[in-house]
Image (cartoon, helix red, strand yellow):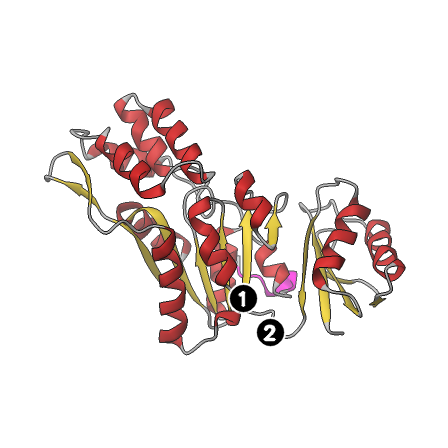
Amino acid sequence: MQHVLTLIAPAGQLQAPLAARVRAALIALGADAASPEWLAEEEALDIPFARLAPEQADAAARAALEGLPVDCVAQPAEGRRKRLLIADMDSTIVTSETLDELAAYAGLKERVAEITRRSMNGEIDFSAALRERVAMLKGLSLSALEATWEQTHLMPGAAELVGTMRAHGAHCALASGGFTWFTGRVAEKAGFTSHHANILEDDGASLTGTVAEPIFDRDAKLATLKRLCAELGLPLSASIAVGDGANDLAMLDAAGLGVAFRAKPVVAAAARVRVDHADLRALLFAQGYRAGEIVS
């Protein structure tokens, strides 16, 4: 079949009758849709199809699901396994916004988090917002970085996503609007091949309230994706990108498969693929990995 529609749900929440309903919806639009093939029992399955555009299949599936907590990924069947993963960090690979959590140690979490929210939803300029938030932390002891790291946790499925893709020969890169102080630690913990982010400046005892220029922003994320593909000898179509904020949109749009993960409204509305319900293993199922292939 030319295309494949993947349905993914939190474990135990995907049932065969629901898959049959989605397949019937595709057929009703004139698609040639094969029987569902389970990738993970009651969690993820493929429906190969032809004679229907992926966008039409996605819309038909969502209508048939009637708001149930199931994610859909419709795409060409050929080349679905990617050789490069490029991922945002905050609220994507880790569960928190590390800058917001760091600001808590200065008593500024709510003020900083509101600026973060507006920046990630594309309401204000990312670089200006980052400089403003970092300036508010001038004089904060470096011990706050360690305390923040101790409370930073990987997103469910993150280690499996990275471990599985690396086991199959992929390069896995973090590309974050946050800071290398955190991305280096997250990369080591989750198994990323490389990490790319902003440099938070200090005087050896406390933060100076400045970030090194140039800012690693939306354009830098896109440039990193393109550079890594060139260095690895890969077409952009062989990459998968994931993120949740407005500064991720350019790389999501350029990647072979761009996934908005539990994303901000402006990102969810613009992205071709979004994952709202499942964990990060959804990106493996979208590439056709079966449960038995996932590295835990």
Q: Which residue is mark 1?
A: 256
Q: Is residue 25 left or right of residue 3?
A: right
Q: Position of residue 168 (x, y in %)?
A: 51, 71
The image quadrant of residue 129 is top left
User: Viewer-proximal residue, 24 or 35?
Assistant: 24
Quadrant of the rendered image containing residue 178: top left
The part of the chain drawn in magenta is 290-295
Q: In this figure, which residue is indicated by the disc labeled 2? A: 79
Residue 294 inside the magenta-drawn segment: yes
Say whether residue 43 is left or right of residue 128: right
The residue nearer to you, when weighing 28 against 38, is 28
Q: Are marks 1 and 2 in contact (CB under 8 Å)?
A: yes
Determine whether, in the image, residue 145 is placed left or right of residue 111: left
For badge 1, the amino acid type reads Gly
Q: Nearer the viewer, mark 1 or mark 2?
A: 1
The type of residue carrying mark 2 is: Gly
Residue 224 lies left or right of residue 166; in this view the side is left
Q: Which mark is residue 97?
A: none
Q: Helix, strand, or loop for circle 1?
A: loop
